[in-house]
Image (cartoon, rainbow, N blue to C red):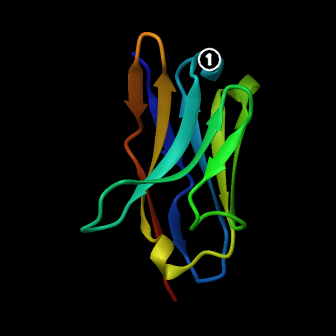
Amino acid sequence: QVRLVESGGGLVQPGGSLRLSCAASTNIFSFNDMGWYRQAPGNERELVATITRGGSTNYADSAKGRFAISRDNAKNTVYLQMNSLKPEDTAVYYCNAVVMFPFSNYWGQGTQVTVSS
């Protein structure tokens, strides 16, 4: 069974930075895509950033220029570096991993990020 474990969330002031980590229980090269999503209270879960097996990245407009997704295949870990954080970034952040064939979609348990003064 694949497990994804997020860490690195917490309370940060506006303008601050956090780095989230997602450690997988298996070789992340087996996933076609990995990514970060977030869900704020009362809102639907939304895409933040994704990274393919080959290293191509995709960002939500709200994340462009402030967030950076990366992966360390040797450590089976995906990161989300978040800079210039805003109160509207407050949410539970979830790690996601996808295998295309056969299709499998995995989620972590989430880590809370709170941006507040």
The residue shown at (74%, 34%) is 55
Decide if residue 79 is on the left or right side of residue 115. Answer: right
Quarter occupied by residue 90: bottom left
Where is residue 92 shown, x and y percent of the image?
A: 40, 58
Q: Nearer the viewer, residue 32 or 87?
A: 32
Q: Nearer the viewer, residue 91 or 33?
A: 33
* Above or below: residue 94 compared with residue 100: below
Quarter occupied by residue 67: bottom right
User: Which quarter shows the N terminus?
Assistant: top left
Where is residue 12 shown, x and y percent of the image?
A: 56, 75
Decide if residue 100 is on the left or right side of residue 62. Answer: left
Where is residue 71 shown, x and y percent of the image?
A: 71, 36
View extreme (top): residue: 102
Q: Which residue is mark 1?
A: 27
Disc count in the image?
Answer: 1
Decide if residue 23 is on the left or right side of residue 83. Answer: left
The residue shown at (52%, 47%) is 36
View extreme (bottom): residue: 117
Where is residue 100 shown, x and y percent of the image?
A: 48, 18
The residue shown at (75%, 24%) is 74
